[in-house]
Amino acid sequence: MKLPLIASNLLLIAALGAAAAGAQSRSQLRFCIASDPKTFNPLLVDDDPGETIRYLTGGVLVRLNRASQQLEPGLASTWRVSKGGNSIEFTLRPNLRFSDGTPFSVDDVAYTMRQLMDPALHSPSGDAFRAGNGQVISRVIGKDRISLTFSVPIVGLDKLFDQVAIMSAKSPAKEMAVLGSYYVAEDKAGSYLVLKRNPNYWKHDAHGQPLPYIDSIRVDIQQNRDIEMLRFSRGEIDFINSLNAEYYDKLVAQSPRTAIDAGVGLDAEQLWFNQVPNSPMPAYKKAWFTSAAFRKAISASINREDLARLAFRGHARPAVSWISPANKFWFNAKLTAHPFNQKAALESLAQEGFKMRNGTLYDREGHTVEFSVITNAGNKYRERMATLIQQDLAGIGVRLNVVTLDFPSLIERITRTFNYESCLLGLINNDLDPDTQMSAWLSSGANHAWNPMQKTAATAWEAEIDRLMHLQASTIDEKKRKQAVDRVQEIAWQQEPLIFLVNKNALSAISPNLRNVLPVVLRPQVYWNIDQLALDTKGVYNR
Amino acid sequence: MKCIRVSAIVFLSVLSLACLFADFLAPAPYAQQFRDEPNASASRQHLLGTDDLGRDRFSRLLYGTRVSLLLAPAAALIASVLAALVGGIAGFAGGRLQSSVMAATDLFLSLPWLFLLITVRALLPLNTTPVTSVIITFALLGCLGWAAAARVICSSVRSLCSSDMILLARASGSGGFRLLCRHILPNVKPVLAAQFWISVPVFILTEANLGILGLGVAEPMPSWGSLLRELESFSALSSQPWQFAPIVLLVVTVSCFHLALRKQELWA
């Protein structure tokens, strides 16, 4: 009699254990980030891991839908930007609470804005709001309504609130009290973080079921991408948000359903010539680099299709403009990628006085056309591109010397000493609004790569770009802004101060167990709809 | 043991000849990109397949071997000459000069080599041809790699100076320069030779390390370091075993250098 009893107890324990294991695996999402987040204060985040945690935990008044690229209501059910563009009024959802139970009110919005604009805090998220004198006036209109007024009009004002996680003014937990779908429950520095489902999260699905579906998230700190990939192959993590081309191809070979190519992304790779007048470079080289005909000839001699196909294994597209085609609204669709045409390039160079003799190109004064391109060491994609460009340019008799430098040395050369001839680097774009690239396009900007911080624009076309960029920044009329930005793209396409090479595709790896995934090109590509994601142990792949 | 040593010497000789005649043996120029055949498998046309840019791996291996195998001894020679000068003078002079030179040598040894190389490489002129960049890289290795050998030489010279042989030479009226040239240098020659041969694989490996960091020999010129970069990601290891050729060659060559040395030279 005893034996069957013991056996049945053992069976029960085993079944319970299995059920518990199943429940746990169903309810915990796992993925990796490269390092510990520097801070949990959402207003001070300036690193990728911090951005990840802010996205998962922070509650925002409005949220940019990464798929439709349109704003959607968040903590605010409605919002309205004033005609002047310097004021915005939010109507908040009633009866919301922070993760620790503290009630959410308009005072929290006012407190967050005060913190955000506090010059002593140096909030990176606040930079976009600091036009004019950097003051904001918060006016509580009613129990659930608040108006925020800035000293000058701010373009794309409502979209900026996608980055502002609201903090509690009263909670003793301070920044750890959150309004997002998860809260930080455990932080083991250098090892992992556990985020748990926020019991007070406001969102429900169409059937009235509270969101998010997944109970907890374990975020492992893993700097080594090889190990991350290995862990994904073993099923220990559920997704890799951003994948390189090699890993993507390997996944396609192993398990095609897990490899996702969401299409062309926002990031661009580009090459530019040093046009700084007082750079330590011979005058004849400065003359080449400031000549639009020379730049265009070099651009026409680069086979962008081959760059995309060979350097990125086909997971990139020839770039057209400083705005990627993935940016649906702002990209100028009239423009096309510069065609690969070395014959036309040589004809154009001949008109400028360049001559080809014995396979070598000489300028009007008889100097051999030879220059160097610097890029950051260790980035194999850029090194591959540089090598391909080297061979392409050999086709028009140009000798290109590829130099790989450690990143600090490279930055020193392109921003301080200007001791370089050309540079190949990438542009990481997180924002859709072109206003965030003012510093790159204004001739007075510190990030105006080819000739930064000019007192007055060196060329007429740069002056025109300055005018257009100021114009788009001073009006909230989207149509006028679009026209101005389109024209800037046209000028950049004609003058080619930056030779845009390719736009990389957004690649990711997603476990078949993860449901409701809609990978997109905007960051965060995989978990942008984190509150909708669900885990399924049966391996049903629902996308 | 003698048989192994002979085999190692034969292997190194054959390898040296193969890379010297790379122009005739290589099926394609090392920089030529067969863009329609990237990542091709091993075939008759491409014995070790092609790399990401469609370059023939076998040709690149031959030329890369030439670069690494010819310039590493040159760098070792620079390092050995510097070590002989610094260590020899310090050991012969003795006293305060020896203490201060050896303190400087210790300081040099304590410097993080790799970072030092990266920094010095970053300070060099940008517009250098790939051939010049190769020479600069190995010259740098030679100029920075003398310290350990200098310590050994100094110690050998010091012990020689206190030997009966030198005492006798002094008693016979030999002066400083004559002592150094006629008595001390010939006697530290085996130590110097050992240091030279030990340095060769060290410089090959250092260049390979720099190449893996992307800071070695400039494109499109190949070296073992740049060829080894293909093995960076583990995903590359599974499907194309011929990609291992550079690392196999590196390991075998470095081993042969050690085997080729006489036991007493190695422990001198």
Image: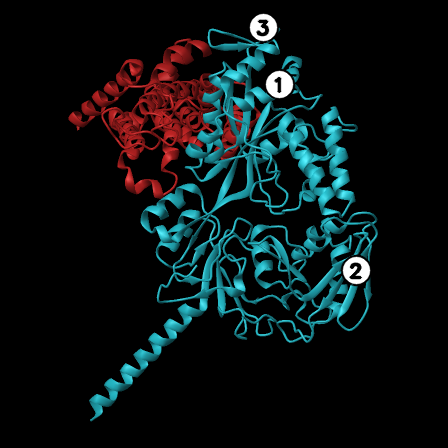
Chain under disc 1: A
Instruction: Residue type at mark 3: give it.
Output: Gly
Q: Secondary structure at mark 2?
A: strand
Looking at marks 3 and 2 on the same chain, the residue that comes earlier in the sequence is marked by 2
The label number, if any, that marks residue A148 in the structure image: 2
Q: Which of these two is toward me, A98 or A33?
A: A98
Q: Secondary structure at mark 1?
A: helix
**Residue A281's x, y, as percent?**
64, 18
The residue located at (69%, 28%) in the rendering is A451
Q: Secondary structure at mark 3?
A: loop
Image vertical order of residue A102 relative to residue A123, above or below: below
Whole-angstrom CA distance, mark 3 to mark 1, is: 18 Å
Q: Residue furthest left?
A: B3
Same chain, marks 3 and 2? yes
The residue located at (41%, 61%) in the rendering is A542
**Residue A299's x, y, as percent?**
55, 24
Q: Which of these two is toward me, B127 or B259?
A: B127
Q: Circle 1 is placed at which residue position?
A: A293
Q: Which of these two is toward me, A485 or A414?
A: A485
Image vertical order of residue A506 relative to residue A346, above or below: below
Chain under disc 2: A
Quarter placement of the N terminus of chain A: bottom left
The label number, if any, that marks residue A366 in the structure image: 3
Whole-angstrom CA distance, mark 1 to mark 2, is: 49 Å
